[in-house]
Every structure is written in C-alpha cells, then in structure tokens.
Image (cartoon, helix red, strand yellow):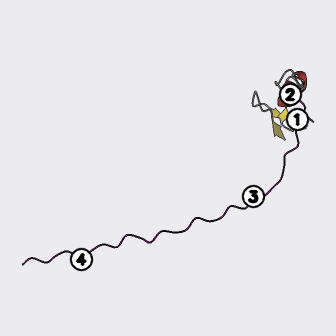
C-alpha cells in the first residue's frame, strides 16, 4: 500500500511516476497534475544533468595549541 504524495490518500496498488519516483493516486499520477519536477525541466528546454560523483580531498587544518591558563597568584 502506498500514500499519494499531494493528497495523502492510501493507494492500492501504489502507482509511481516514472520520472520523479513518487507515489500518487489516479488523480495525481499525470505529470501535470502533480507538477512533476522532471516536467518543469523538460518544458524549459533544460536537460537534466547527471550527478557527478567526485571526491575532493581537503587538507586538514593545523591544530592550534590550546590556551593554557596561568595559575592565580595566591594572596592569603
């Protein structure tokens, strides 16, 4: 069982949009009905870019010495 993303109805069997992979009822399944993210990029002419999986190495910063507290002068 699934739950429609916009309206919260329980859906059996769950229907998924092939573009955004969210679950919808019959009323919200069409791309225009649920304002699919994939639809907005195809209408604007922008092709979705694949996600780049790169790892960038960052040099660790040098650790500073912690401040040392001076002992108090004891005045009795």
Quickly name the residue at label 1: 48
Q: Earlier in the sequence, mark 3 or mark 2?
A: 2
Q: How many marks?
A: 4
Q: Residue furthest left?
A: 76
Q: CA distance from mark 4 to mark 3?
A: 45 Å
**Highlighted range, magenta:** 46-75
Q: Nearer the viewer, mark 1 or mark 3?
A: 3
Residue 50 quadrant: top right
What is the crowding at mark 4: few (fewer than 14 residues within 10 Å), some, or many (at least 20)?
few
The quadrant of the image that shows the N terminus is top right
Which percent across, then down, holds residue 38? 87, 30
Sequence-first tag of 1 and 3: 1
Q: In screen coordinates, is 10 left or right of 14?
A: left
Q: Where does label 3 land, which residue?
A: 56
Mark 2 → mark 1, Cα distance in angstroms: 7 Å
Q: Which residue is mark 2?
A: 41
**Residue at the spot of label 4:** 71
Give coordinates of residue 37: x percent, y percent.
Answer: 82, 30
**Distance Cα–Cα, label 4 vs label 2:** 65 Å
Closer to viewer: mark 4 or mark 2: 4
For label 1, the crowd category at 10 Å Cα-Cα, with few meaning under 14, some 14 to 19 and many 20 or more, is: few
Q: Are marks 3 and 2 in contact (CB under 8 Å)?
A: no
Out of 4 and 53, give the one closest to the viewer. 53
Q: Position of residue 48 (x, y in %)?
A: 88, 35
């Amino acid at each position: 069982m699934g739950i429609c993303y916009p309206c919260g109805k329980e859906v059996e069997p769950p229907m998924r949009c092939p573009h955004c992979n969210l679950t919808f009822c019959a009323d919200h399944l069409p791309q225009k009905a649920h304002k699919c993210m994939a639809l907005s990029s195809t209408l604007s002419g922008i092709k979705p870019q694949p996600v780049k999986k790169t790892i960038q190495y960052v040099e660790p910063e040098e650790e500073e010495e912690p401040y040392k507290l001076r002992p108090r002068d004891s005045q009795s």
